[in-house]
Image (cartoon, helix red, strand yellow):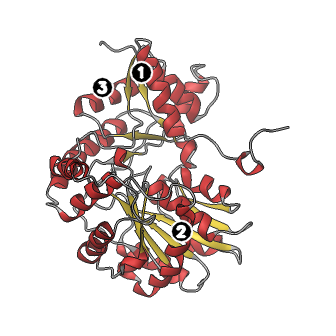
Amino acid sequence: MPFAADRLQAIKPSPTLAVSAKAAKLKSEGKDVIAMGAGEPDFDTPQFIKDAAIAAMNKGLTKYTPAGGTPSLKKAIVAKFKRENGLEYTEKQILVSCGGKQTSFNLCLALLNEGDEAIVPAPYWVSYPDMAMMAQGKPVFIQAGIDQGFKITAKQLEAAITPKSRLLWINSPSNPTGATYTADELKGLADVLRKHPRIVIASDDMYEHILLDGSKFVNILNVAPDLYDRTVTMNGVSKAYSMTGWRIGYCGGPQEVIEAMENVQSHSTSNPTSISQYAAEAALNGDQSCIDAMVAAFKERGKAVAEGLNRIPGVKCLQPTGAFYAFPDCREAIRKLHAAGKLPAATDVAFCDYLMVQPQGVAAVPGSAFGAEGYLRISFATSMENIRKSVDRIAAAVSGVAIAA
């Protein structure tokens, strides 16, 4: 008799965490492996944010808070949405959670009934489908490969919608592809969504501030404000302020949906960490120039990664326009390596294993973890030295030529 509940039978462990764990194990054994799988900035949390956390501790602000977040942090989030996104919310429309991941999880549990369909553009962030399935929903995938810039079209969206469609995720800038939807592209999706009022839109804006092409961030509500009553705008402090370990995500949306999500949270984690909330408040209210140096570094690194990967035979890579990921198409290289007998199977998982166990290895996440077989997710949230070494190592592995240390 299986020990785990039936609903967990189709749920997989996080592949990004699995790659990081394998790389750490190889390093502990003395292997030379460069980890390019981490989904977090390599910058430290700005000092003024850490100081706010220390001050909160010294004031004794270490007790329970309201389940949905402190009133002062909610005020800061309301101000942020208005100042940066032109979105008007009240504090009753705001929920603070233990990271952006819990925000999405709360939404799935609060919204989806058994058999409801959650539309997931692919490539997708790894947890979207599993969250939907844990809520007894059914993920429905829309494939958008490198030929269309990893972005779904209005025509594809219309074709995927059924009477059971209940939720759509829009993640821009994207993890894992670094692609960003333009205002016109979002308008096209909005035109379709207007015809299907039962669908709730989850706009995952976690990488909002990490734009690498000089463009201005746009949310679907900026081009279609009439969808306000069924859009949940999700964000957090993890990426913009290099606060991944602080575990603070937040969202704004229709009050009825937010109240349902808070009810879910009150019976799971209860409130997010009090100290982290005061740090997040300082981040949102403080000097935003701390983001600029980080984005400038990511812009330079993203250019170096894409240019380097495109020089490798059998690899194609688009220039990422946001976030800190490149998503190269390695299908041709994988086929050639398999034909040469270097891979046991013509899969991205076999390719990633091959890259990692080279005398000088690289840890990357297979694209199949994100719904795109034959691709890799390469995080450039690391030093330029590591980036150059990693590209050289991938090139050497593809060509089968050893490189000097």
Residue 242: x, y in percent? 28, 47
Identify the secondary structure beneath mark 1: strand
Q: Nearer the viewer, residue 274 or 346?
A: 274
Q: Which residue is rendered at x = 16% and y = 53% of the image? A: 290
In the displayed structure image, the side of residue 261 where residue 133 appears, left or right: right
Residue 330: x, y in percent? 49, 38
Q: The N terminus lies in which quarter of the figure?
A: top right
Q: Which residue is mark 2?
A: 261
Q: Which residue is mark 3?
A: 389
Q: Nearer the viewer, residue 399 or 195?
A: 195
Q: Nearer the viewer, residue 182 or 206?
A: 206
Of the numbered discs in the image, which one, if any, rests on residue 194? none
Q: Quadrant of residue 42?
A: top left
Q: CA distance from mark 3 to mark 1?
A: 10 Å
Task: Identify which amino acid the numbered label 1 is placed on.
Answer: Gly
Q: Is any atom of residue 210 visible in this view?
A: no
Residue 4 vertical position relative to residue 345 in the rendered view, above or below: below
Identify the secondary structure beneath mark 2: helix
Q: Which residue is mark 1?
A: 361
- Dot 2 or dot 3: first in sequence order is 2
In the displayed structure image, the side of residue 250 where residue 51 appears, left or right: left
